[in-house]
Every structure is written in structure tokens, then in C-alpha cells.
Amino acid sequence: MDKIRALIVDDSSVMRKIVERSLRQAGIELEKVVEAANGAEGLAALQSNVVDLILCDINMPVMDGLEFVRQVATVETAKGVPIVMITTEGSESHVVQALSAGARGYIRKPFTPDQVKEHVLPLLGKKR
Amino acid sequence: MSAAGRLAERSHEENWLPILELAIQEVFEIMLGCQVKPVAPSEHKTNAEFTAMVGLAGALCGILTVRCDANTARLIATHMLGDAAGSEEQAADALGEICNMITGNFKNKLAGTDEQCMLSVPSIISGGEYTFRSLADGVSIETALLYEGASIFVRLQLHS
């Protein structure tokens, strides 16, 4: 698998770094990591960056993750890019909302690197 | 029975303290690779130099706080990030995220509450010279945990 470009959207800079580390631990080679602290920053980042994978929190200030996922569908260069939610929100209704909005995976915090591997690798077409 | 009474009764009947402690232990084990164990709050005192808070609204209304001293907050950040940790900002950020995950994990363990309860984004107070007062009736559940020889205090204050 080629190196990938990832966008990580989370209001915690610590969590963004943990997510990046988890991707590397999953054996995913990262060409570039773009970070954003909320959905609005994430959308702005997509205007100037083409990415292969988006990982996104739900509870964030300014624009939450569900609204971000809905709006990603309108960004031409991001259409078809897999989005995985990584969030403390564990309810079925949040999962349904996220998947309906266009997310392809859902990981509940706290999470292990193995969970990231399990949810992300199939979306990138890599065999486990 | 008043709403406060029903809340107190439910928290007592369902014995929420062990559920809260389990939620805390899972977060530390999974995200930091560390074990924490409950201790009597009176056994360990700490300078609460950092306080992280996450609000709950809906089926549960209130606030969950996590308090610890600055060294402990930095240690948490170091465990979460490895060598990359160090600044006070990262320590506060890490404690806020721990508080966020504890609140979410606790909420997810309560039957019938998860679907109807929203969480705020975390806020962090630096400095211990403050007094917390709640103006609403409610229930308070507090526990202290020993983490790498230092105490961490977690308090769930629920309103009716």
C-alpha cells in the first residue's frame, strides 16, 4: 500500500497525536498528516489539501464532527474519502447519525491501536 | 418524590460509584497503559493545580471533574504521548481528554442514559485557589485513585 495522507480532526492536540501514532502502529505509512481542531478548520484544510483518510471527533467547538462529515460530501476533492469517527459518544443514535452522514467507521474512546487497525485498514484496502 | 430524590435513589440503587471507578480504570489502562486503584480520599491529599471539567446535559445533568497536581498532569501527558510531552498546555489538554473519556465511558455504562445525554467539550482550570459550589440540588459521587504514587480525584456532581 502506498503512503497515505491523513486529516485528523480533534479539538485535543494530545488526541490528534495519539491518533497519528495509532495509525503508524497499525502499519500505515503516512506521507502527510494534516491536523484540525474542529470541523470548520477541517473543511478549510480540505480546500488546500488532498487526503486519503479522515479521522474525526464528534464533540468539538465551532463545528462538531457530525456537521463536518455532512459538509465533507460537498467538497469535490474529498468525495469518496473514507471518514472514521473517533469519539467518546458511544450511543447507537450517534453511530447511526455518523454513518448516515457519510462516515465509514466508528471507534469509541478509549481505544487501542488494534481497534484503529481493525477499523481503518479495510477502508484503505490493506489486508490484515 | 422530587427529581433530586429520584436521582439519588437511582444512583444508590444502581451503585454508581463502582461503575464510575471502572470507567476511570478502563481509561487509564487503555490510553495510558497504567493501572489505577481507588483509595480513601482522606488518605491522600493533593494540590489541585489542574481541574478538568466536562458537563452533562439531558438524562443526566451536571459536571464531572478530575483534579490533580501539576506533576501528575504532566505525567499523564507523558504516558499518553511518550517523549513528546512536556508543556503545561499539553498537560492541561491531556487531563481534559482524560476527563472527557471518563465521562463518556461512565455515561455509556449506564443503561438508558447513553442515548439521552450529551457531553460538553472539556474545560480546564489551572490553579487550586478556587471553591466549587453547586446551586442546584443533586447527588455527588466522589472517588480518589492512586496513579503512580499520586492522587487523582474524580467527582461527579449531578443536578436534578
Image: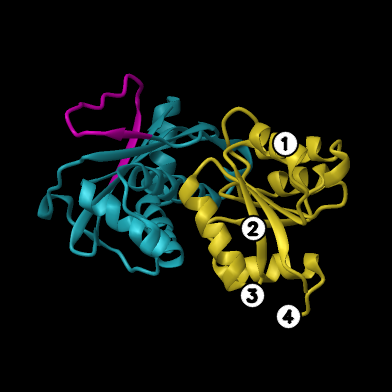
Is residue A128 left or right of B69 when viewed as pictured? Answer: right
Q: Residue A4: which numbered mark, if any?
A: none
Q: Which residues are magenta?
A: B124-142
Q: Is residue B109 visible?
A: no
Q: Which residue is mark 1?
A: A43
Q: Residue A27: which numbered mark, if any?
A: 3
Q: Are marks 1 and 2 on the same chain?
A: yes
Q: Which residue is mark 2?
A: A107
* Distance (Cα) linking label 3 and label 1: 27 Å
Chain shown yellow: that is A
In magenta stretch: residue A38: no
> In the rendered picture, chain B carries what hue?
cyan
Q: Label 4's element?
A: loop
Q: Which residue is mark 4?
A: A128
* Distance (Cα) linking label 4 and label 3: 10 Å
Q: Is residue B48 visible?
A: yes
Residue at the (58%, 38%) spot, across then down: A59
Looking at this view, is B95 or A6 the one in front? A6
Q: Earlier in the sequence, mark 2 or mark 3?
A: 3
Estimate the x, y position of residue B7 in percent, counting from the top left. 43, 35
Q: Is residue B100 above or below residue B23?
A: above
* Distance (Cα) linking label 2 and label 4: 18 Å
Q: Chain of mark 1?
A: A
Q: Earlier in the sequence, mark 2 or mark 4?
A: 2
* Distance (Cα) linking label 2 and label 3: 18 Å
Q: Earlier in the sequence, mark 1 or mark 2?
A: 1
Q: Amino acid at mark 1?
A: Leu
